[in-house]
């Protein structure tokens, strides 16, 4: 069964929808430039409502030690997602200091971008493949997708997530081409930039569950 991550959660209503519909991961974005950015105190309130079995993920972009400490010291997160240009040394430092599972995002435009992830596999717990932004002001959550065919036949030593431009309308097509361990969506379940749409969240989750149950 393909797991489901809904990223960019900011409101109790969106979180409640993820819980009731059966998401496996919810993401809180701690990147100030993002329209999905969440304040630490708000994230703490929401994270405390998350039931056992639903994993909370904090998304960071090239975080400083101070930023990580300020967030992780208050918000009870289960995983750290690194969505910037973090190198292996930075990833190792974060993992060794905070002892939390790490999701590392890799932007993809061609096959060589996928191969760059290989060197990180020993140091992370999940790989996430997202579209490499073209003329975008954010490292992710742009609504852009990449050529899913680039991932065909690829196998990894760690589980991996497919991200980038997924929607309730195209996720079945993606899952017909690939067999990711999880799918990750953000802008594809929004009614406006940074505004989650509960109907779209429900439809996305139901579509994935129905597809993988076949």
Image: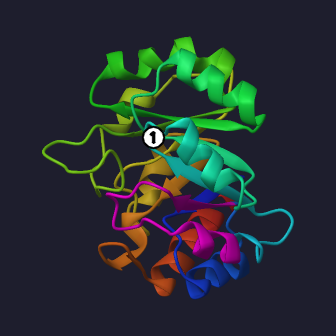
The quadrant in which residue 16 appears is bottom right
Q: Is residue 22 above or below residue 64?
A: below
The structure residue drawn at horizontal position 32% and vertical position 44%, both measured from the top left corner, is 139
> How many numbered tags mark residues here?
1
Image quarter (top left, top right, bottom left or bottom right) of the C terminus: bottom right
Q: Nearer the viewer, residue 187 or 205?
A: 187
The residue at the far top in this view is: 119
Can see residue 95? yes
State yes or no: residue 195 in magenta.
no
State yes or no: residue 26 in magenta.
yes
The quadrant in which residue 130 appears is top left
The residue at the far right in this view is: 52
Q: Is residue 197 above or below residue 37?
A: below
The structure residue drawn at horizontal position 49% and vertical position 86%, both measured from the top left corner, is 199
Q: Read off the residue under disc 1.
A: 83
Q: Is residue 162 above or below residue 20?
A: above
- Which portion, as a residue range, is magenta? 25-46
Q: Nearer the viewer, residue 26 or 174?
A: 26
Q: Is residue 137 left or right of residue 197?
A: left
Classify mark 1: residues with Cα within 10 Å, few (<14), some (14-19) or many (20+): many
Q: Nearer the viewer, residue 23 or 69?
A: 69
Residue 131 locus on image (x, y percent): 32, 41
The quadrant in which residue 212 appears is bottom right
Residue 204 locus on image (x, y percent): 51, 70
The structure residue drawn at horizontal position 68% and vertical position 27%, both measured from the top left corner, is 158
Q: Is residue 160 left or right of residue 49?
A: left
Residue 55 locus on image (x, y percent): 74, 58
The structure residue drawn at horizontal position 87% and vertical position 66%, both measured from the top left corner, is 52
Can see residue 2? no
The residue tagged with tag 1: helix, strand or loop? loop
Q: Is residue 58 above or below residue 159?
A: below
């Amino acid at each position: 069964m393909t797991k489901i991550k809904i990223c960019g959660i900011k409101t109790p209503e969106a979180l409640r929808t993820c819980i009731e519909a059966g998401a496996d991961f919810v993401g809180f974005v701690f990147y100030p430039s993002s329209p999905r950015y969440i304040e630490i105190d708000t994230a703490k309130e929401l994270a405390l409502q998350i039931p056992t079995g639903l994993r909370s993920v904090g998304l960071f972009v090239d975080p400083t030690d101070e930023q990580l400490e300020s967030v992780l010291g208050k918000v009870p997160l289960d995983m750290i997602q690194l969505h910037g240009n973090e190198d292996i040394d930075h990833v190792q430092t974060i993992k060794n200091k905070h002892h939390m599972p790490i999701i590392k995002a890799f932007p993809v435009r061609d096959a060589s971008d996928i191969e760059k992830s290989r060197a990180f596999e020993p140091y992370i717990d999940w790989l996430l493949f997202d579209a490499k932004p073209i003329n975008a002001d954010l490292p992710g959550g742009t609504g852009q997708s990449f050529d899913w065919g680039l991932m065909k036949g690829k196998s990894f030593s760690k589980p991996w997530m497919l991200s980038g431009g997924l929607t309730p309308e195209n996720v079945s097509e993606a899952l017909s081409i690939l067999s990711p361990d999880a799918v990750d969506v953000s802008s594809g379940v929004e009614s406006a930039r940074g505004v989650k749409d509960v109907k779209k969240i429900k439809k996305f989750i139901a579509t994935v569950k129905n597809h993988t149950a076949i």
